Amino acid sequence: MWVLRAILVALVVVCVVAFALYNVGSGQAVTVDLIWVKFVEVPLITVVFWSFAAGVLISLFLFISVYIKLSVQLRATRKQARALEGEVTILRNRPIEESADLLMRSEKQDEKANSPFGAGDRK
């Protein structure tokens, strides 16, 4: 998977460099008016390059935030899975008689809870 990603990144870099080299000789210049400063007669390729770099940085920050959120969620899920596996292991290792006794006790408690006469204090 990492090979495919490396090839894709290399392809994007080659496309950006080819685009830059193709447009560098045309002499196109633009005026860039930001809120706090104005740039006059900036080569178009410079504007395209910095726009691309800004997009890469914004995407990187968004990816990092999603990655951190997912890794925290994955860690919690793995911890819960380990706890549940431990519980299953404990239940598997119990003797059958003990499990049957526990089951019978829980059924009797359920019957008492459902009975209208079983609830409440007895004196």
Image (spheres, rainbow, N blue to C red):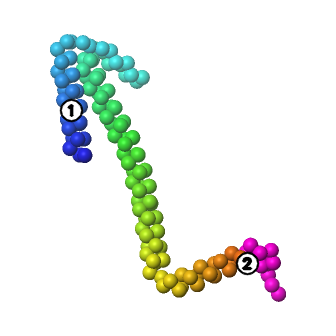
Please tell me whether residue 28 is drawn above or below residue 117 in the rendered image.
Answer: above
Q: Amino acid at mark 2?
A: Lys
Q: Nearer the viewer, residue 4 or 15?
A: 4
The residue singled out by tag 2 in the image is: 112
Q: Is residue 119 rendered to the left or right of residue 71?
A: right
Picture residue at 36% right of the left edge, 36% below the top: 58
Q: Is residue 89 rendered to the left or right of residue 123?
A: left
Q: Is residue 119 rendered to the left or right of residue 64?
A: right
Q: Which numbered tag is attached to residue 11?
A: 1
Q: Residues within 10 Å of mark 2 (few under 14, many from 20)?
A: few
Please tell me whether residue 81 is drawn above or below residue 10 in the rendered image.
Answer: below
Estimate the x, y position of residue 29 in percent, counting from the top left: 26, 13
Q: Is residue 101 rendered to the left or right of residue 6?
A: right
Question: What secondary structure characterizes most of the magenta part?
Answer: loop
**Residue that sits furthest to the right in the current view:** 123
Estimate the x, y position of residue 41 in percent, counting from the top left: 28, 14
